[in-house]
Amino acid sequence: MLRIGIIACGKIAQVRHIPEYLSNPDSTVVAYYDLDEKRAAEVASRFGGRVYASVEELLADPTIDAVSICAANAYHAELTIKALRAGKHVLCEKPMAIRYEDCEAMTGVARMTGKRLLIGQNQRFAKAHVTARQLIRDGEIGRVLTFRSTFGHGGPETWSITPGAATWFFDKKLAAMGAMADLGIHKTDLLRFLLDQDVIRVSARLSTLDKRGPDSKLISVDDNAMCIYEMSGGTMGTMTASWTYYGAEDNSTVLYGTKGIMRIYDDPAHSIVITYRDGSRRELDLEAIQTNDNQTSSGVIDEFVSAVLSGRSSVLDADDVIRSMRAVFAALRSAEEGRTVETLV
């Protein structure tokens, strides 16, 4: 039985991490810490477990095996490194960190301590994505030439534990990046997963078009990010992340191959639709994509528990996810410098 501590008790912890740990027969949540001690106490009263007065006190408890880092982006690296050095396995929310050097430090400490570090890239577990990856490997649409991938919704204001314009997602000191960190990392990581290729070159534009803070001024992080990715296998395409899709959420990916076109979560009736060069069509009905308004089991917590207890490698291992972060940081440089940037792969 894996005994879990939750560090930061906000929305992601309450909606995904804690319920999914408690529904897994091989794990239980026993500890909580949050800067807001009242919030931590309320969560503990709902789910059971003990509240700790500090991160250090929680990490010093030898009965805790592993922790989930559910804090704001700016704290991911510091908290992860503290937990690893305290002998805990770590599941860290995305984005992995706000600087590439921090990502490297996190993976380095994990290797040094021998503790597991996984990152919560949940799109790798959506059934249509898992199926699509295998179909691509099997050559169903031939060689993938181009793609377009989109993740857009109306913004994090209603998702955050502090809803509205005061959400930490809009605070550059806490979030560092906006839509690119919140949504763009998901689709960047997904493209690597689907294609078995790394991003090697990026041309990006990040803008703040509409979102405003409590002062009615445009927020200090991006609310839209548009990237052109060139991949290591010769495939190229676009990745768009947006907080200004004020309608239905769009979490679609379309792949254009030499034998046909594969649409993933792009058709309202079917999870995957393939149209072939001869005009024929194949439809696959799997599960609907998870949205902020339709929460289903992410698969991330089950994967973390299983990987830690069995000692096996995982698709969420930080040593792999860091390659997706390289593309994100290259996109930031590209937008800042107004030029195409090569990644560090």
Image (tube, grey):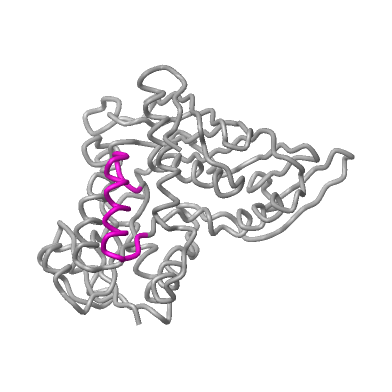
Q: Is-magenta flag for residue 113? A: yes
Q: Residue furthest right?
A: 278
Q: Residue at x 49, y 39 (%)?
A: 152
**Spot occupied by residue 256 in the image (x, y as percentages of width and height):** 71, 36
Relative to 204, say whether 186 is above or below: below
Describe residue 279's horizontal placement relative to residue 61 as left or right.
right
Q: Residue at x 18, y 69 (%)?
A: 41
Q: How many tags in the picture?
A: 0
Q: Residue at x 66, y 33 (%)?
A: 146
Q: Is-magenta flag for residue 162? A: no
Which quadrant, please, contains the N terminus?
bottom left
Relative to 7, say whether 147 is above or below: above
**Spot occupied by residue 319 in the image (x, y as percentages of width and height):** 40, 53
Describe residue 24's horizontal placement relative to residue 105 as left or right.
right
Relative to 325, say whether 212 is above or below: above
How would you classify the magenta stretch by its main secondary structure? helix
**Spot occupied by residue 262 in the image (x, y as percentages of width and height):** 72, 44
Tell me the magenta residue range.
96-117
